[in-house]
């Protein structure tokens, strides 16, 4: 049901796996916890950094979908100035 929030007091994306495009070129995949004054707090996050990861982003995302999110960070805050577009991970082809 649209608009239903499992945990009262949290926003609609709470607990949903999302993909966030960063201003730095990094891409973050993990479970949305909340948006706060410091930035977006996520849980169990995998980070694609094109400067250090030879995989093309689309290939990396496909692997995350096929095998599950290979989290490297248990708890992560993406600063407001870094956070760009947010999409549900289940909306990717």
Image (tube, grey):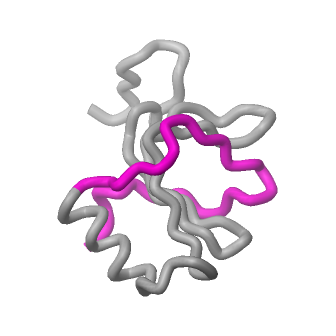
Task: Specify whether 93 is left or right of 76.
Answer: left
Q: Position of residue 60 (x, y in %)?
A: 37, 75
Magenta stretch bounds = 68-93
Identify the residue shown where x is 77% and y is 49%. Answer: 80
| Image quarter of residue 85 | bottom right
In x, y percent, where is residue 41?
61, 37
Residue at (55, 66) in percent of width and height: 27
Residue 38 in the image, given as x and y percentages of width and height: 78, 37
Residue 47 vs residue 20, the one in the foreground:
47
Residue 28 part of the magenta-drawn span: no
Q: Residue at x 42, y 16 (%)?
A: 7
Considering only vertical position in the picture, is 48 above or below 40? below
- In this rendering, is residue 92 above or below 90? below
Q: Quadrant of the N terminus?
A: top left
Q: Nearer the viewer, residue 44 or 89?
A: 44
- The answer to which of 11 and 63 lies nearer the viewer is 63
The answer to which image quadrant residue 22 occupies is bottom right
Position of 13 with respect to 65 (left or right) is right
User: Residue 72 colored magenta?
Assistant: yes
Counting from the top left corner in percent of width and height, residue 20 is at 55, 59
Q: Residue at x 63, y 81 (%)?
A: 51
């Amino acid at each position: 049901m649209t608009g239903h929030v499992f945990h009262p007091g949290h926003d609609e994306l709470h607990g949903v796996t999302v993909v966030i495009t960063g201003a730095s070129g990094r891409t973050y995949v993990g479970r949305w916890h909340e948006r706060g004054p410091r930035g977006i707090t996520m849980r169990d996050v995998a980070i694609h950094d094109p400067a250090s990861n030879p995989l093309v982003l689309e290939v990396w995302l496909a692997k995350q979908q096929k095998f599950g999110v290979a989290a490297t960070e248990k708890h992560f805050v993406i600063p407001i100035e870094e956070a760009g577009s947010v999409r549900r991970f289940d909306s990717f082809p």
